[in-house]
């Protein structure tokens, strides 16, 4: 297994584009995760001036709610990771190095495993950013800290891991189907931004709840804030088992698609 | 008999109506240098792609080292298929480290193979900055990594300059002298004639000849002869037991010799019959003629 990790990481770690995109991702995530609270509060204080009832300040960073808030915000950026996946998987077809890998003696199964490692690595990096930000901001924004307060909602992190991993599995399957980065990114974007939105609008709720990317996104719902409570809106504060199971099933299907393409094709 | 390295049985690969391979049987023994000869599109790369497990055969089977093929058997086979395939943004060493990791070979072997293909001074250059010849040599270096028992080379001299071609051929000969079995696909007859011990000729996915290179040449020695008295010469040639066929060309006769006869014997026979030649040339491209004949023969 260790040699598979070495193989995959040599392919990506020595690539400047990889570090550039990952760097942008990390930087962007940190800026947004740290900056959102003061941004919202600025908007709120502007709105307060003409509001009859005073809107209280937002606090996104107190334990335990910080897990929910950060994972929800971070979910918007997973598309950058998806693009990294598409880019590096299509490289293997573009340079035909998948053929050389197999000729050299890498089994098709192991080639697949190296790619799964890559997805896990990216998902892991994303989770680490959230953990780092949560620890720093959480400790500075929570008054009475206890271990249980830190841990109680940290299962949002597990849900976030699943959300990102499922999303990346989707982008990997598309890369294996379409092979070329440009085509894959276009198909991916059209599906994500247009097709699923139209379908979820047109379809009956009974069916639209099965749309894969919508399901992944639904794992972590919009956090309830004091503002929403004010308006009596109440979002889900727990992770729905239906969504979790459905996401797991989709992930398995998507990984199987990638695996079968590697396994059955002529390279 | 040497042990069997590769056995191909009744292999077929069809792409829709195109029969890239149409029933090929082949056995390669240890220590052989087998040339796979055939015109463009005859199925050379497809055959090698199948035994290297990147192309799924339509029917038939093959065995490496007398066992069912597995990825680990490929670790003992060094191969270049069609063109060098590397990560362009990685340097020579990193590209070879990936190969070494796949084969579970120590990185120490890397410098050694780079020396053999004379790329050591460019080991830290990115693959995309390499010239075609250097790319080709890096591919050979990667195939040599870990001292594989078998080397598969699909047109290894493609795109090289004459000096590069000569260097690669010398290298291949050296490697084969160390006992490595080599399978070389080529459409250059000259190359096969110079390097190989055995030859298989493919055409349209079918094996049309198989044998030793040596036999192929002796079998089919053709000689150009010319004298001042052509009718007399023709009569002499017709009577000689060594000639298998005589063909009249514009200014000379093209004589095909029976197996076991050579140019010297022909010359001796003419001279001892009291006649002299003013032109005698043994065909240098015997293999080429034979090759072309094989290809034009209706199957
Ligand atoms: N992926 C493919 N799809 C359809 N036909 C193919 C494919 N690959 C090869 N062929 C066909 O199979 C036949 C054999 O091709 P192959 O590449 O094996 O020839 P070759 O002997 O290596 O030729 P060359 O000397 O040009 O390299 C050709 O007719 C080719 O068009
Ligand atoms: Mg070819």
Image (tube, coloured by chain):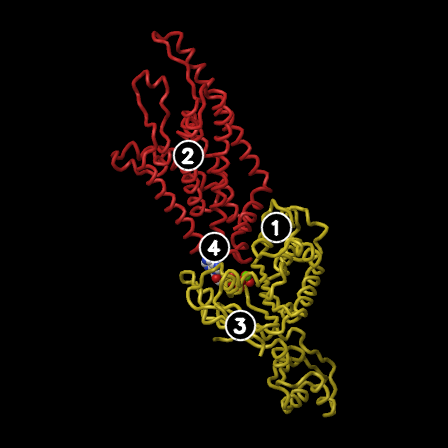
Chain colours: A red, B yellow
Chain for numbered disc 1 = B
Chain for numbered disc 4 = A
Q: Secondary structure at mark 1?
A: helix
Ligand 1 is within 8 Å of the C-beta of the residue at disc 2? no
Q: Which residue is mark 2?
A: A160
Q: Which residue is mark 1?
A: B95
Residue B187, can we see it? Answer: no
Query: At 48% from the left edge and 36% from the top edge, which residue is drawn?
Result: A81
Real-space CA distance between mark 1 and mark 3, rounded to the nearest whole angstrom: 40 Å
* The quarter of the displayed image where residue A166 is located: top left
Q: Are marks 1 and 4 on the same chain?
A: no
Residue A105 is situated, as x and y percent measured from the top left of the image, at: 53, 58
Above or below B220: residue B22: above
Q: Secondary structure at mark 2?
A: helix
Residue A212, can we see it? Answer: yes
Q: Are marks 3 and 4 on the same chain?
A: no
Task: Nearest to the eye among marks 2 and 1: give it.
Answer: 2
Q: Are marks 3 and 2 on the same chain?
A: no
Whichever of callouts 1 and 3 sits on the residue coming sooner in the sequence is 1
Q: Which residue is mark 4?
A: A108
């Amino acid at each position: 297994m260790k040699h598979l990790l070495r193989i995959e990481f040599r392919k990506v770690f020595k690539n400047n584009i990889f570090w550039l995109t990952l760097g942008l991702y990390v930087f962007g995530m940190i800026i947004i995760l740290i900056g959102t609270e003061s941004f919202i509060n600025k908007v709120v204080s502007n709105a307060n001036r003409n509001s009859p009832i005073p809107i209280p300040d937002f606090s996104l960073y107190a334990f335990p709610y910080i897990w929910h808030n950060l994972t929800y915000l971070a979910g918007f950026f997973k598309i950058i990771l998806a693009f990294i996946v598409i880019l590096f998987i299509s490289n293997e077809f573009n340079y035909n190095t998948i053929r050389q890998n197999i000729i050299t003696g890498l089994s098709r199964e192991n080639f697949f495993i190296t790619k799964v490692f890559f997805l896990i690595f990216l998902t892991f990096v994303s989770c680490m950013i959230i953990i780092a930000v949560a620890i720093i901001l959480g400790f500075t924004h929570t008054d009475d800290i206890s271990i249980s307060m830190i841990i109680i909602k940290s299962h949002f992190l597990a849900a976030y891991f699943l959300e990102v991993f499922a999303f990346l599995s989707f982008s990997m399957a598309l890369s294996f189907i379409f092979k070329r980065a440009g085509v894959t990114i276009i198909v991916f974007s059209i599906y994500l931004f247009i097709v699923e939105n139209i379908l979820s609008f047109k379809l009956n709720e009974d069916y639209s709840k099965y749309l894969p990317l919508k399901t992944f996104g639904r794992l972590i719902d919009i956090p309830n804030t004091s503002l929403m409570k004010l308006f009596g809106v109440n979002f889900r504060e727990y992770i729905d088992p239906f969504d979790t199971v459905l996401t797991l099933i989709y992930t398995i299907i998507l990984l199987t698609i990638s695996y079968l393409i590697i396994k059955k094709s002529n390279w | 008999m040497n042990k069997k390295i590769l056995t191909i049985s009744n292999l077929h690969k069809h792409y829709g109506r195109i029969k890239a391979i149409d029933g090929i049987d082949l056995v390669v023994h240890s220590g052989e240098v087998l040339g796979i000869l055939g015109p463009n599109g005859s199925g050379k790369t497809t055959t090698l792609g199948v035994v290297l497990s990147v192309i799924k055969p339509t029917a038939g089977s093959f065995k490496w080292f007398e066992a069912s093929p597995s990825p680990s058997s490929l670790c003992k086979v060094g191969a270049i298929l069609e063109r060098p395939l590397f990560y362009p943004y990685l340097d020579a060493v990193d590209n070879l480290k990936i190969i070494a990791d796949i084969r579970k070979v120590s990185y120490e072997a890397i410098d050694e193979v780079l020396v053999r293909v004379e790329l050591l001074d460019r080991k830290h250059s990115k693959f995309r900055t390499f010239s075609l010849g250097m790319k080709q040599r890096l591919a050979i270096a990667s195939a040599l990594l870990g001292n594989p028992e078998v080397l598969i080379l699909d047109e290894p001299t493609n795109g090289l300059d004459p000096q590069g071609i000569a260097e690669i051929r010398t290298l291949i000969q050296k490697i084969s002298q160390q006992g490595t079995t080599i399978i070389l696909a080529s459409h250059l007859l000259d190359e096969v004639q110079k390097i190989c011990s055995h030859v298989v000729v493919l055409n349209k996915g079918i094996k049309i000849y198989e044998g030793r290179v040596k036999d192929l040449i002796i079998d089919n020695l053709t000689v150009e002869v010319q004298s001042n008295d052509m009718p007399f010469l023709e009569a002499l040639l017709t009577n000689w037991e060594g000639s298998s066929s005589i063909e009249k060309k514009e200014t000379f006769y093209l004589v095909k010799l029976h197996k076991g006869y050579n140019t010297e014997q022909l010359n001796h026979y003419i001279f001892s019959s009291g006649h002299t030649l003013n032109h005698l040339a043994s065909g240098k491209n015997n293999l080429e003629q034979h090759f072309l004949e094989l290809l034009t023969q209706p199957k």
